[in-house]
Amino acid sequence: MKNAVISSTGLWTPPHSISNEELVASYNAWADNWNRERDADIASGLIEPKTHSSVEFIEKASGIKSRYVMNKTGVLDPDIMAPRIPERPNEQISVMAEIAVNAAREALERAGRKPEDVDAVICAASNMQRAYPAMAIEVQQALGIGGFAFDMNVACSSATFGIQTAADFVRSGSARSVLMVNPEICSGHLNFTDRDSHFIFGDVATAVLVEEESFAPAGHWKILGTKLKTEFSNNIRNNFGFLNRAAPEGIGAPDKLFKQEGRKVFKEVVPMVATMINEHLDELGLQGTDLRRLWLHQANANMNRLISTKVLGHEASADESPTVLDTYANTSSAGSIIAFHKHSEDFVSGDKGLICSFGAGYSAGTVFVEKTA
């Protein structure tokens, strides 16, 4: 069996950023308007008024301070409260494929690769733009890559599931070089009028190039092991899809956007992921102390703090478990890849780390890597 490695990564960041202060101001203005329009019903006790959000609430609940988005004006307009991204004609590259290509070009350049060197493309993301044709095939065409391409969706764990899938193709000899991309326009699925979640997500695109070891450039990352886990839960859900387009409540109704039972998710996912990581460490003959760094899913600072403590035996420092959550927010499948991309240049040969993601499903994936010379 051939050995699979990570040769490079790529990152594309949208040009627009929204601070917590800006987001809170727009939400509070929307809430005031909503309350004003329903003043009589609120006064009679028929409905509860919308309460204000605050910067303090957001940062305490999540650790998020700002987020990048594809469209800022629509999100911050109290009369819209959603991104406004113009629909493109079918003859033009779709917006998700475009941002995936941007990230992919950086990954290819960093590995010294040309598109013709790549055998397959996987688009692994939570928020696909359409059912078909596959986003991955559009990315494949835009870059001029041969071979095959397909989409996969395992919510926030899509990237780690994508890495294992790419690695399995390499291990089996089905491909020598696989490009895995994670375009995430999460703002399109977020309910910006929900106080408990209006701050969670941001937009971004990442890419990972997984290749056969003998073909990989110097300084690559050996994949020591990958492990995947799923367990069904309704606590994180998004009901949007082509089957409910004609639903009476219509597209954009709260049930067709992101929703979660945050406390339940926290209580159930933290022990599940920590146990999974530790069991995988045992299978590989490693201990938490062997890890130089954890690149965890960027969803919630408090979750990451507890998971890292259960793995390392102590609360992780910023160096041991870096965060990009403060500036990028939750970018779904891309979060752990952003952390890896931005916080791995200081590794030397022999240093080991963990890329880990977890989210709706429930789903979780672990990818243990070792830096080579």
Image (cartoon, rainbow, N blue to C red):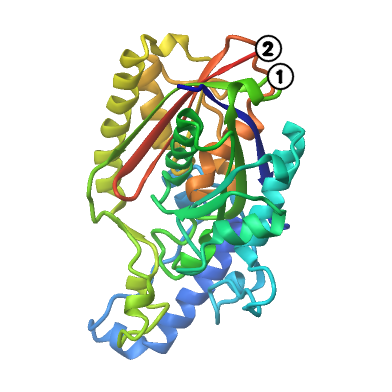
Residue 226's place in the image compared with 54, above or below, is above
Question: Where does the image place residue 18, in percent across and percent down from the top left?
Answer: 64, 58
| Label 1 element class | loop
Reading the chain from its start, which is encountered first: label 2 or label 1?
A: 1
**Badge 2 is on which residue?**
373
Which residue corresponds to the image point at 37% horizontal and 87% vertical from the top-left?
A: 38
| Residue nearest the observer in this picture, 369 or 200 | 369
| Quadrant, the N terminus | top left
Mark 1 crowd level (few <14, some 14–19, many ≥20, 10 Å Cα): few
Q: Residues within 10 Å of mark 2 (few under 14, many from 20)?
A: few
In the image, residue 283 sits, relative to residue 59, either above or below, namely: above
Quadrant containing the C terminus is top right
Residue 339 visible: yes
Residue at the spot of label 1:
218
- Relative image position of residue 106 (x, y in whole percent): 73, 42
Q: Are marks 2 and 1 in contact (CB under 8 Å)?
A: yes
Nearer to the camera, 180 or 274: 180
Asked whether residue 12 is in view, the answer is no
Query: Disc 1 marks which amino acid?
Result: Ala
Q: Nearer the viewer, residue 108 or 240?
A: 108
**Relative image position of residue 316 (x, y in whole percent):** 47, 21
Q: Quadrant of residue 5?
A: top right
| Disc 2 to disc 1, C-alpha distance | 6 Å
Q: Which mark is residue 206?
A: none
Q: Residue at x 69, y 23 (%)?
A: 345
Task: Provide the secondary structure element on which disc 2 rests.
Answer: loop
Q: What's the residue at 71%, 52% (across, down)?
A: 102
Q: Amino acid at mark 2?
A: Ala
Q: Residue at x 35, y 64 (%)?
A: 238
Residue 214 place in picture, x, y as percent: 63, 20
